[in-house]
Image (cartoon, rainbow, N blue to C red):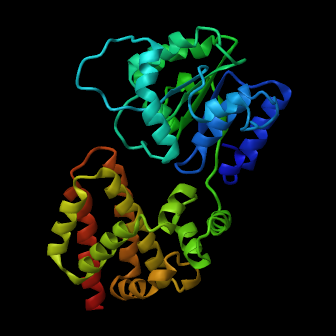
Amino acid sequence: MSYARICGQDRAKALTSAWLRHGRVPHAVLVSGPPGIGKRFLALELAMALNCQAGGEVACGRCVPCRKMAELAHPDLCVLLPLKKKEEEDRQSPPWDEVWAEVRPPAREYLEQELSLTRSRINIPKKHLLALQRELSYAPAEAPWKVALIFEAECMHPAGANALLKVIEEPPGHACFILVSSAPQRLLPTVVSRCQRLPLQRLGQDLLAAQLEQEGVEPQRAGVAARLGEGSLQRARQVAAGELDGISGQVERFLQAGVEGQDGVYWELVDELSTDRLRLEQFLSLSSHYLRDVFLLSCQRPGDVARTDRLELLQQLQAKLPVERVEELAVELDRGFRCLGRNVHVPLVLAELWRQLRQGSQAKARA
């Protein structure tokens, strides 16, 4: 583990290095920014650097504390993240050893596989936060700092977050809290106000493309992946590896069938998307990319198109959709994203989008 795993983010790296260089690391840090840009790895790197035996501005990654931290095996590292609630009723305040035995395996999987829990609809349990609060009151066992890493911090149970707030307000001198969040607006304002903000930014397309090419991706595919990555290295890697090809195929079926009036395809896709909210979110996101490219073609700007690998299909859609209808479809997509957060039934999310496609193609045909 090192800064080499974190693409870009020079300002955030410089700030953490300055904290360590001057011995002024805040007792509570909030690492925030969009998904897939390196927040969790920067947080772990800071935790490692705090207890690194080399004592530099960056963790050496070779000493025993660094290796233990990287493996989530250091006794002075506490990690929490959202977990599915067990069916059986557990004790309200278990000892930290029990909590850690439950948390460590999914935490390692979360880091190693770069999993996303942003829309998981599960909480960081109150009992885990209470156990963490108690654990941080004890002195470190092996290192100068006892570090608490809280991933997806916006998922903290409100009662547990209030309990944790008491510790953040008057932290022990040996404790450092590092909260990681893609949605800091969902955190308690009182928690945010007591944290030093460490915001990370979306990555530029050139930086993403260069990173992907360095990882062995063919330049043209790297360029397409960088444009579709929305500033996220994780998403760009997924596109480059073909992990979103299946969803792209669904989007293309939906758009083509919509402009051609094939209603049977609509119901097929509703069935396919209704059981997976994350897949529906990805479907809507990719749909917005396709429609943006159709709009750019309508505005005679082919050089700005992201899906250059699907140019023929985009031209076919552009020929059947008036530009004003494409704008209305974009507005409808935004509404669909808002509906996701309110747990709206999938057919309702897609129905208006489908209607706009049908009407748009009919209007173009009449013209």
Left or right side of 149 for 320 = left
Residue 125: give x, y in percent of width and height: 38, 23
Which residue: 64% across, 9% down?
A: 139
Q: Nearer the viewer, residue 94 or 322?
A: 94
Q: Nearer the viewer, residue 205 or 333?
A: 205
Q: Is residue 75 above or below residue 43?
A: above
Residue 242: give x, y in percent of width and height: 44, 68
Visible in this render: residue 349? yes
| Badge count | 0
Which residue: 85% across, 27% down?
A: 22
Residue 150: give x, y in percent of width and height: 53, 29
Q: Quadrant of residue 271?
A: bottom left
In the rendered image, the quadrant that contains the C terminus is bottom left
Left or right side of 92 for 206 = right
Q: Is residue 6 above or below residue 91?
A: below
Q: Is residue 159 above or below residue 315?
A: above
Left or right side of 129 for 221 = right
